[in-house]
């Protein structure tokens, strides 16, 4: 799944208006929050910790209207703790987001 700007960028623009510095700050905040949840997913060894991190990631995605990340968080919720494929997909999303 490749990063598609659409709704996420529109949400950032709506929140920041015409202020490019604020848009950049919001992008950094989004990325840092996502990184924290990815780290928690990587370290999760039980269903409870995995599900909490995936739900937090899903909440972040929903807050920013990041549909691709929302789908990936749902995929994580239906996967076993530590599932490397879903973690790699989420990391790929985030790295493509960071490049934009």
Image (cartoon, rainbow, N blue to C red):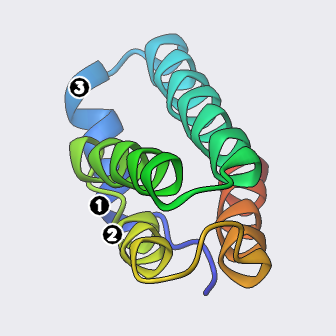
Q: Secondary structure at mark 3?
A: helix
Does residue 17 appear in this view? no
Q: Quadrant of the N terminus?
A: bottom right
Could you say which disc has been placed on residue 15 in the image? 3
Q: Secondary structure at mark 1?
A: helix
Q: Is residue 35 left or right of residue 79?
A: right
**Identity of the residue drawn at 50% across and 20% down:** 20
- List the residue tagged with mark 2: 67
Whole-Å distance between the Cαs marked 1 and 2?
7 Å
**Identity of the residue drawn at 23% across and 41% down:** 63
* In-front residue for pair 9/65: 65
**Identity of the residue drawn at 30% across and 20% down:** 16
- List the residue tagged with mark 1: 7
Badge 3 crowding class, 10 Å Cα cut-off, few under 14, some 14 to 19, many 20 or more, is: some
Could you say which disc has been placed on residue 19 in the image? none
Q: Earlier in the sequence, mark 3 or mark 2?
A: 3
Q: Are marks 1 and 2 in contact (CB under 8 Å)?
A: yes
């Amino acid at each position: 799944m490749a990063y598609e700007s659409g709704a996420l960028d529109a949400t950032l623009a709506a929140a920041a208006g015409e202020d490019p510095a604020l848009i950049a700050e919001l992008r950094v905040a989004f990325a840092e929050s996502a990184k924290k949840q990815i780290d928690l997913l990587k370290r999760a060894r039980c269903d409870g910790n995995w599900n909490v991190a995936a739900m937090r990631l899903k909440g972040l995605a929903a807050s920013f209207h990041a549909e691709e990340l929302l789908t990936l968080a749902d995929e994580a919720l239906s996967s076993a703790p530590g599932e490397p494929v879903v973690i790699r997909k989420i990391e790929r999303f985030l790295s493509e987001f960071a490049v934009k």
